Amino acid sequence: MRKGELMTKTEPRTPIEARQNPAGRPRHLFRALLSALRPRLMCRLCWRLTGVIFLLATLILAPFYFSAQAPSLALFASLILLLTVVIMLSLQLVLLEPVLVLRKRVHRAIADPKPIPDRVRAGHWPHELGDLATDLDQLLEAVSGHLTSLARFPDENSQPVLRVDAEGRLLYANKASAPLLGFWHIAIGDVLPQSWPDVIRRVRAEHKTQSVDLKLPSSWLNLTLVPLPEAEVVNLYAIDITERKAYEETLRHQRNYDQLTELPNLALFQDRLQQSLVEADKDQQRLAVMILGLRDFSTINGLAGHEAGDQVLCEVGKRLQARLSPSMTLARIGGDLFGILVPDCTSVSQVAEFADALLATLSPPFLVGDQVLHCGARIGIALYPEDGADYSVLLSHADLALNSAGRGTDQCVHFFVAGLNQKVQQRTQRIRQLDEAITDGQLEVWYQPQISATSGEIEGAEALVRWRHPREGLISPAEFIPLAEETGLVLPLGETVLEQACQQVADWRSAGRGQLRMAVNLSARQLTDPQLLDKVIAVLERHRLPAAALELEITESAVMADTAQAIAVMRRFVDLGVRLALDDFGTGYSSLSYLKQLPLHKIKIDRAFVRALPDDAQDLALCRAVVQIGSSMGMRVLAEGCETQAHVDCLVDLGVDALQGYYYGKPVPAQDFPAAVAGAGLPKR
């Protein structure tokens, strides 16, 4: 076979032919091996010829030289030379011949069109070099398979892989890149769209890998741009980050929106308010910030349950949103508080009319299941730039206006006025003074007698707290009790009253009034105190009082704030032996369905229903109904506000069990109590 034919048939001409003919690759490698062996064989051949010529010359000339000098040495030299020739011939057979054989077989492998792996499996190799050649062929075959797999890797990748040149022209794109190329409207050979060529040039100039997020119509991709300076190209590797983007969007929504109503929360409301302030300042426009609060929303939670309350909040958000224009923002900024941002206000009257319209949308009742619920509202308003130029100041002033609107029953919309700041400062100072009063012992407990309607004897007393200020004198409970409840100071205040009242009744009992009972008021905040029961037990044990000597008075509003928890606490007190009374009955919602669940011993008729007796027929009917309810449910009934003989006669005729009011005595300090009720025979302390 001619050399030209051999090269044409066996040697791959291009890299593509080499990939298409993997079996030809070992033949090509054997040719390289043969080329490497050829110079070594020529050198060894020259060495062998030189050695043979040297030996022949020595064999011929040595006998003549040594025969003249020493015949015995000539014989010895001849033997040595003969041994040398034998050794060299042996080395030739052992080392040189196998190499020559390997070279011949390489020639045959090159010339043989049959694939090398098939010939290796079919051949017989009787010596170690043959086995080595077999292992070498198998290794080359495995490597060629891996190289082929690596060459196919970009095409088999499920994520987009692209290559562009220095100008952003697309050189390569795998199959997974089809959606991306369709989005860009390009093909192989086209330049990347938009600003991508500039990005490519910047990546090449900086020689740094960069990452870019790309939004497709239905997915997100993260493109990693890897520059290859030696090839003057940039590879783009894309991964699908749609799920990650969806998760980030969920977190962003949770961070900025209320999960119940899906309205913006306080953080997003503040951000939008800041942006609106910048625009209002630039355009010289007025802006209004409103805070809307629901009235008696805690009562809805207590009567209908928290799920019903949540539905009411959602319905409130929908009604308010329907009244707002697209430029306005509605947000839920608290439990029952909503913020409204009204940009570009023309006048104060326009803002007031809009606030009244918002309140009107909440006037219709809310239908939750089979329940019809009513929920009023109030609004506080602060204006920019009159009431402040900072978002936090405007929100604070709107909140102050809201609190001012909440103090009156008729005034539901209130604008911030400068005087509110002074009132806030006074309120803050009063709270600090109240805290000091509790610590310094400025609080006093006064007592008002409770008289049995049948015997006329004193059966107990109600403990009422008074604050004797060192400079201002006596401060009305109507001023500091609400502050104590709002700030949480009612807890230490209540403990002070309970301690003094129990100590006083213990002293009276030890002085001979063994059946006297002390009534102490509990606030809604105290009912939520997890340590309340332990505190009461500790006070009773400290003063050695039986539990029946203490009566705790609880208002309807305190019970309705969290009915389930209140009932649980009340039952624990009943199990302990403490008596319970429902104070101011009739002034709240007076739910009979909850009344039958409460473990009560007494109902107290509020003074509002006693004041007009016996002339007011409606008050008379209401008092008669309360007495009948209490009697039928096994509860004693006490009437407050008894100030005249007519009140006493009417209430006794109705069948009340006990009476309390100015007719029998005003609240007085402990030292004045025996004198105030001297007719009852109460001993002095």
Image: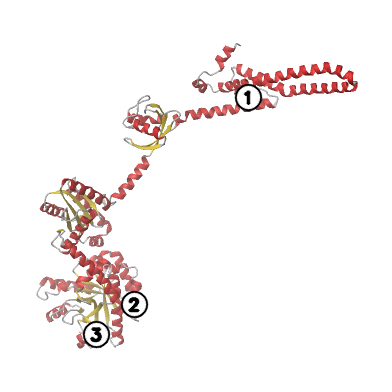
Badge 1: residue crowd in 10 Å (few <14, some 14–19, many ≥20) = few
- Residue 259 rendering spot, x and y as whole percentages: 29, 51
Which amino acid does the dot numbered 3 rest on?
Gln
User: Could you tell me if residue 3 is visible in this image?
Assistant: yes
Q: Which mark is residue 539?
A: 2
Q: Report crowding for label 3: few under 14, some 14 to 19, many 20 or more residues within 10 A (C-alpha).
A: few
Locate residue 134, reporting x and y percent.
Answer: 64, 26
User: 61 or 135: which is nearer to us?
Assistant: 61
Q: Which residue is mark 3?
A: 671
Q: In the picture provided, is 26 more to the left or to the right than 486?
A: right
* Tag nearer the camera, 3 or 1: 3
Query: Which badge, 3 or 1, is on the more N-terminal residue?
Result: 1
Amino acid type at circle 1 is Arg
Quadrant where the N terminus is found in the figure: top right
- Sequence-wise first label, 2 or 1: 1
At 15% from the left and 48% from the top, the residue drawn is: 285
Q: Residue 368: in sight, yes or no?
A: no
As drawn, 395 above or below 499:
above
Q: Secondary structure at mark 3?
A: helix
Q: Nearer the viewer, mark 3 or mark 2?
A: 3
- In this view of the protein, which residue sits in the foreground, 534 or 670? 670
Q: Between marks 2 and 1, how big is the CA–CA gap?
A: 101 Å
Q: Is residue 289 left or right of residue 141?
A: left
What residue is rendered at 45% in x and 29% in y? 230
Amino acid type at image mark 2: Val
Cα gap from disc 3 to disc 2, whole angstroms: 22 Å
